[in-house]
Image (cartoon, rainbow, N blue to C red):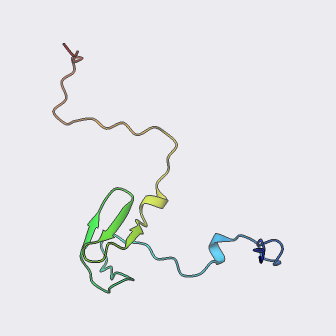
Amino acid sequence: MASISTLSELGMSHDPAARGYHVVYREHEVNHCPGCGRTQWLVGRVSAECAFCATALPLAEASMRHHKAAVVIQHRNRVAESAWAA
């Protein structure tokens, strides 16, 4: 059974900046699916999925956001009083 060599054994290092082309979904641009070439997408919070072949891509904007503080989601019609379950 053949063993798989690690990057360090091959004399290579992990450098994400030098890895080359990285496919991401870019907001406000025409995004062609790398799987089927179409341009219809279902966009979520951190990824977009091709509506035809289900190829998923990460959002370019999602990787640029800073996550230093916890995200608090508040409804715009929120009442200042606390709601207690009965």
Quadrant in the picture for residue 54: bottom left
For this rendering, which residue is in front, 17 or 56? 56
The image shows residue 34, relative to residue 67, as above or below, that is below
Q: In which quarter of the image is the C terminus?
A: top left
Residue at the far front: name it: 1
Q: In which quarter of the image is the N terminus?
A: bottom right
Quadrant in the picture for residue 2: bottom right
Q: x, y percentage for residue 52?
A: 25, 77
Residue at the far bottom: name it: 37
**Count of labels shown?**
0
Q: Is residue 66 left or right of residue 36?
A: right
Q: x, y percentage for residue 71?
A: 40, 40
At x 54%, y 81%, the residue is 21
For this rendering, which residue is in front, 86 or 73? 86
Q: x, y percentage for residue 26?
A: 37, 72
Q: Is residue 47 left or right of residue 9?
A: left
At x 22%, y 36%, the residue is 75
Q: Is residue 76 left or right of residue 44?
A: left
Residue at the far left: name it: 77
The image shows residue 82, relative to residue 58, as above or below, that is above
Q: In this view, does 23 lie to the left or right of 14?
A: left
At x 48%, y 60%, the residue is 63
Q: x, y percentage for residue 80?
A: 22, 21
